[in-house]
Image (cartoon, grey):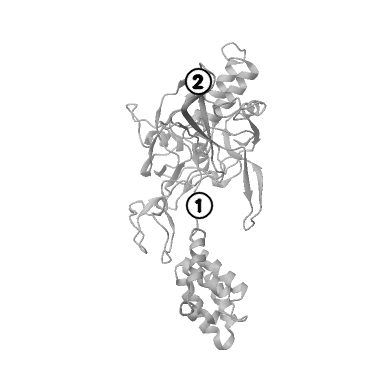
Amino acid sequence: MAQLTVTLRQPTQVSTSVRSDGVLDTEDHIPGWVVRGAFAAAWIRQFGEPTRSTKRGLFQRLFEGEVRFGPLFIGAPPPPLSAHEHKYQVTPNCRASHVDAALLDLTTVLRECQDCQQTWEPMRPRSSTVPIHTRTSVVIDRDTDVAAKGLLFSRRRLPARSRVSADGDRESTVAPVTLRGHLTSDDSTLLSELANLSGLRIGGRRTTHGAVSVALDSAADSDTGGGGDPAALPLVRNDGVIIVRLISPAVFVDGEGRPSPQPSNEELSSALGVDAKVLRSWKRWGSVGGWHAASGLPKPTETVVTGGSTYAVWCSSVPTPAAVKSLVRRGLGLRRHEGFGHIGGPFQLPTTLTATADLSERLAQTLTEDDVKPYLVLGSDGGRIPADLSSALRGALADAAEAPSALALAKGKGGRIFGAQSEGRAGELLALPPARAEAIIRWLEQR
C-alpha cells in the first residue's frame, strides 16, 4: 500500500452526471476510476498503445486487476450513513449533537432526540474546505467561430490554489490544493512503475485544466492495516461485530446478477475466513456514469451504493487481524480495481463541545446574573473563575473521567470554608447540558 498525494497545478473538473441546465458540474474529490484513467493515459503517452507495445502484459497488470486505485480527498472521507445529527439546530438542553447508530444496540431504531424531540437525520457530507469555482462561458458557433447568441454554459471546478487561514488568525495565505488517498498492490514493483510516470492530467478539458504533481509514498505494510495506521482497519465492537464503512461507491450484485444493496454473505465469509453475514446496514443507492474522452461517448451508468454506506457484520468467530487487513486491501464488490468498494477505518463523531461552540458563545451573551449567580462561588480572582479551574471543567465536560479531578480542584480553590460549596456547584455545572455549561464558564471568565 502506498499513499498517493496529488497537488493541483491547474483548475480541475471531474465530471458528474450530465445536467440539463447548462452547468458542467464537478466532484469535490477525485474518484478512484478517475485516478486510474489518469495513470493509464500517462502510461500510454509514454509507452504507446498497449495493443502495439511490447509492454502489453505490464499494462494489463497495472490497470486490469493487480493495482487498486482509491479515491482522493482534500480532507476526510464522507461521513458514514450510520452517523446521525439533529435535523435542525442543536439546543442548549441536548446532551449530544451526534450519534453513530452502528455503535448502539443493533436493534435500536433512532427516531428523535430525547432532549429536544428533533428527528435524527443521517449526517450530511461535509462541505469541502476548498470553495468550488464556477466559470461561465459562451458557446462558440462552429460555422462563424463567434459566440452563439443566447447560449451560455457554466463549468464548476476545483481551483488550483485556495486561501488557508490559521485558527483564530484573520490573515490567510494562498496554498496549492492537495488531495490524498491510497494505491494498493501485492507487488511493490507495480507501484514503482506508477511512481515513475510523469505528466499526469486529471479530469476533463485537459488543454487548460487538470495538470497535477504526484507523489507516491510507499509505506511498509504492518499488522495495523497498511501504512502503519491503526485507523485504516474497520472497527471491531466488543461483541465481535465488525463495522465496515465504504469510502467509495461499491457495485454489489445478487445471485442473479441484479444490483444488490449490500455485499453477499459468501463474499464476506470468503474474505474474512469465517462465517459472516450482514446484521444491519445503513446504505443509499446511487449511480456512476461519466464521459469517455477517448471515444467521445458517455460511459454506461452503473447502479451503486454510495460512499459512506455502512454494514454491521456478524462473524461466527473473531477473524484474525491478518484477515481483517486482507479485507481492507481487497475491498468489496465488483470492479474493485477501478476504484469501487474501498473500505475506511472508524469514524470519529464530532464532539458535542465542538459542534455547539458557536451556540455556547451566543448563550454566553444572553445569560443573566440570575442564571450565573449559583456559580459565582467558583470565582476567586476579582470574581473571575481561575484559568486552571475553567480548563479542568472543560476537560470534564469533554471526558467524564476527568470530573473527579475537576471537582477536587474546585474544592481546593474554595478552601476550608467554601470548599464543599464550590465542589457542589461545580458538580451541578457539569450536570448541565454541555452547551449551557460552556456558556456559563465563558461568562465567569469575562467578569
* x then y, percent, for residue 296: 49, 19
- Amino acid type shown at disc 1: Gln
Instruction: Answer few, some or many: residues within 10 Å of disc 1's Cα (few below 14, many 20 plus, some between 14 and 19).
Output: few
Instruction: Answer few, some or many: residues within 10 Å of disc 2's Cα (few below 14, many 20 plus, some between 14 and 19).
Output: few
Question: How many numbered circles does the render carry?
Answer: 2
* x then y, percent, for residue 218: 64, 35
Rendered view: 436 above or below 192: below
Image side of residue 256 versus residue 126, left or right:
left
**Kind of element beneath mark 1:** loop
Residue pushed farthest bottom? 417
Q: Which mark is residue 348?
A: 1
Please say whether residue 67 is visible from this viewpoint: no
**Kind of element beneath mark 2:** loop
Q: Which mark is residue 141?
A: 2
Image side of residue 66 versus residue 370, left or right:
right
- Amino acid type shown at disc 2: Asp
